[in-house]
Image (cartoon, rainbow, N blue to C red):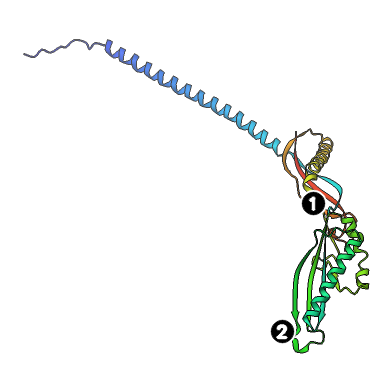
Amino acid sequence: MVRYYYGPIPTRPIARLRRHTRARHMSTTDRSLISSIVLALGLVVGGLFAGDGFVRAKQAERYVTVKGVAEREAKANLAIWPLRISAANNDLSLANVQLQTSVQKIKAFLIRSGVDTTQLTLQEFAVRDGEADQYGGNRTGPRYVITQTLMVRSTDPDRVAATSQQVHELVNEGVVFTSGEQYGNGGPTFVFTGLNELKPEMIAQATARAREAAAQFAADAGSDLGGIRQANQGYFEILPRDQAQGISEASQVNKTIRVVATVEYLLK
């Protein structure tokens, strides 16, 4: 048998349900508010860091580029003097005898002049037969021409330079030769080999002069000089001491060594 109940519906469970729903709604709202606050704080802090980085980037863009020059006189410590000898004759053997005689005369001339001949070498021996030349039918001179280069190498450039001014003595003895034409100087070539020993001190000097220029620029601009942003030591040049048109560095015993350093300094 089924019984029916007609009394009032109990309200306590419904009220408890409403309180539970309202509590859960408040908890969700609190979490959303906290998340929003955390997000806002993150944006603020991130903005501060980004702004600080932007300021630092702007400060890094403030720099000055300057150049510092260092120069020093130096003296060649090596002389190279090629003497190209030639002899011509219709008889090959006689041409060779003439050539060897010229070689002996040059050696005697160098010894008389005080030039060390221990490093003397013979190079580039060549024989040209005029009749073997494709244009030999038009030959008007001797058939055979023999050439050879006598290479003088000395660590006394001053002595070689003085000796090269007396080559007319060889002409008076009948020696046929050309002096230094292979190197384009028309005489001895003077070489400075001590550049590596000068580099550290000259680079320091050039950098110091660059810093002086940067400090002056910063003072004029009302700024403080910071550290080095970028540096380039440049390259070394060996120049003739007496610089004039047509004078080459290789033809002078005395030289000028130059280096230019390019440095970028930050400005505070």
Q: What label does residue 193 carry, if any?
A: 1
Compared with residue 208, is residue 150 higher up or lower down, i.e. above or below? below
Please indicate whether residue 5 sits to the left or right of residue 202 in the image.
left
**Residue at (77, 45) in percent of width and height:** 262
Helix, strand or loop at mark 2 = helix
Amino acid at the residue labelled 1: Thr
Label tally: 2
Q: Where does residue 150 sit, x and y in percent of width and height?
A: 81, 66
Where residue 1 appears, x then y in whole percent? 6, 13
Q: Is residue 193 above or below residue 45?
A: below
Q: Residue furthest left?
A: 1
Residue displayed at 80% across by 62% down: 120
Tell me if 8 is positioned left or right of 49 in this view: left
Disc ID at residue 132 = 2
Does 234 sit left or right of 255 as displayed? left
User: Residue 52's spot in the image, x, y percent?
Assistant: 64, 31
Residue 252: quadrant of the picture: bottom right
Q: Residue furthest bottom?
A: 137
Q: Nearer the viewer, mark 2 or mark 1?
A: 2
Dividing the picture into quarters, in which one does residue 199 lie? top right
Name the foreground residue: 259 vs 35: 259
Looking at the rendered structure, the secondary structure element under dot 1 is loop
Q: Callout 2: 10 Å neighbours few (<14), some, many (20+)?
A: few
The C terminus sits in image quarter: top right
- Report crowding for label 1: few under 14, some 14 to 19, many 20 or more residues within 10 A (C-alpha): few
Tell which circle, 2 or 1, labels the residue nearer the N-terminal end.
2
Residue 160 showing in the rendered view: yes
Give percent across and percent down for residue 93. 78, 79
Name the one closer to the observer, 128 or 31.
Answer: 128
Residue lying at 24% horizontally and 10% vertically, measured from the top left:
10
**Amino acid bearing label 2:** Ala
